[in-house]
């Protein structure tokens, strides 16, 4: 078999290692948060800005939310409050100033369902059953995350969410990985499959206006650019985003299927990595409805993104 899949239980949470033995490519997944902690190319280049250990992730996840699963909402909810089906709710989890951010599952302990290989990939499936743990989201639902490491340095991540409650529930989904290619992001080149950006207010939530965005329509040096913006993808026939490192001669392409029509990009002050986030909705979708999914009882919805690294 060209692939291998192993589970290491020596850390405080199980850690999954998926490997393409011929290409020496490996994905490392923590059951804590179902987060992607490593995507290693050429044996030693990790393009994910991850954690030192599961303990490190547990202690520091809310400092930057690196690789977090964003569910059942993404980015921000203004004041942590929203209205759904004529009822008012206020989430009670993590707040940044007055805004509730990044969902409820970023520190969930996922159960590993399956882990194995076939002729096409190494794979692992993780699941979490949410049971009304936050009074601001009193809906039962299950979240299943499947990782598939395929040939040619391709890693697909499929999320399936099922409404297990007896009433409709609002839903948005996303991921919050930070990518690094070595060095600082100023020296990388970026191309975006987007020419529109959501206008934000001072709370970084959409005003309702959509503005033109003309940078990075072709591959351009990132330089000193600062971004904390949400873009509308033009299509899904091309990568949502392409990041190139001219030193290592590597190209990272992020492919989103139609379930992820938004792309959020954030540049941290240290500039050693860049957050590129596939989102199913705009920030504050529980209030503005932009991209919001409404799941009926027992209904499921699937989301998929793929990361691919190649030389050039």
Image (cartoon, rainbow, N blue to C red):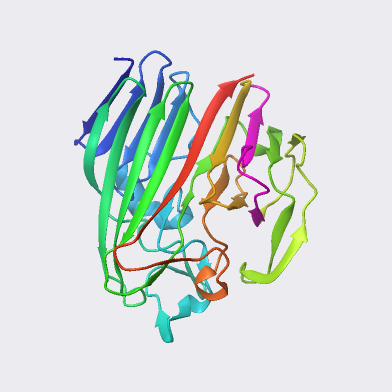
Residue 227 place in picture, x, y as percent: 67, 52
- Give, as a single range, the part of the protein colored magenta: 229-247
Q: Residue at x 34, y 53 (%)?
A: 59
Residue shown at 47%/18% (left/top)?
Answer: 42
Residue 220: tell me if it is visible. yes
Tell me, yes or no, if residue 12 can be seen here. Answer: no
Residue 131 place in picture, x, y as percent: 24, 67
Please check the rendered image and state whether residue 162 is part of the magenta-colored stretch, yes or no. Answer: no
Task: Tell which of 232 and 25 is nearer to you.
Answer: 232
Above or below residue 70? Residue 136 is below
Q: Quadrant of the N terminus?
A: top left
Judge from the rendering whether residue 296 lies leftward or rightward of residue 8; answer left or right.
right
Q: Is-magenta flag for residue 243?
A: yes
Question: Relative to 197, does residue 168 appear above or below in the rendering?
Answer: below
Relative to 183, is 301 above or below?
Answer: below
The C terminus lies in which quarter of the figure? top right
Q: What count of labels does the image hold?
A: 0
Q: Give the residue at x 26% y 65%.
A: 164
Left or right of 146 in this view: 294: right
Residue 72 image-quadrant placement: bottom left
Q: Position of residue 251 (x, y in %)?
A: 61, 27
Residue at 51% in and 76% down: 98
Q: Nearer the viewer, residue 184 or 26?
A: 26
Q: Splitting the image into 4 quarters, where does residue 108 fall?
A: bottom left
């Amino acid at each position: 078999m060209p692939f291998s899949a192993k589970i290491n239980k020596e850390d405080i949470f199980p850690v999954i290692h998926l490997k393409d033995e011929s290409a020496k490519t490996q994905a490392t997944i923590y059951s804590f948060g179902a987060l992607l902690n490593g995507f290693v190319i050429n044996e030693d280049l990790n393009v994910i800005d991850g954690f030192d250990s599961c303990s490190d992730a547990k202690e520091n996840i809310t400092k930057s939310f690196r690789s977090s699963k964003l569910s059942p909402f993404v980015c921000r909810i203004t004041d942590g409050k929203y209205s759904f089906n004529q009822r008012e709710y206020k989430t009670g989890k993590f707040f940044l100033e007055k805004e509730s951010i990044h969902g409820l599952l970023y520190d969930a302990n996922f159960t590993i369902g399956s882990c194995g290989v076939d002729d096409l990939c190494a794979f692992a499936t993780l699941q979490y059953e949410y049971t009304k743990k936050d009074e601001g989201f009193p809906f039962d639902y299950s979240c299943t995350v499947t990782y598939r490491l395929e040939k040619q340095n391709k890693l697909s991540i499929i999320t399936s969410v099922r409404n297990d409650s007896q009433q409709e529930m609002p839903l948005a989904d996303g991921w919050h990985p930070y990518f690094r290619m070595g060095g600082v992001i100023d020296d990388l080149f970026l191309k975006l499959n987007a020419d529109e950006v959501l206008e934000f207010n001072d709370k970084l939530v959409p005003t309702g206006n959509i503005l033109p965005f003309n940078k990075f329509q072709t591959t351009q040096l990132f330089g000193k650019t600062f971004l904390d913006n949400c873009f509308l993808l033009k299509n899904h026939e091309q990568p949502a985003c392409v990041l190139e490192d001219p030193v290592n001669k590597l190209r990272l392409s992020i492919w989103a299927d139609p379930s992820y029509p938004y792309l959020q990009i954030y540049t941290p002050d240290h500039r050693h990595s860049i957050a590129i986030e596939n989102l199913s909705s705009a920030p504050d979708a529980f209030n503005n409805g932009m991209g919001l999914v409404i799941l009926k009882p027992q209904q499921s919805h699937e989301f998929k993104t793929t990361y691919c690294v190649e030389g050039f």
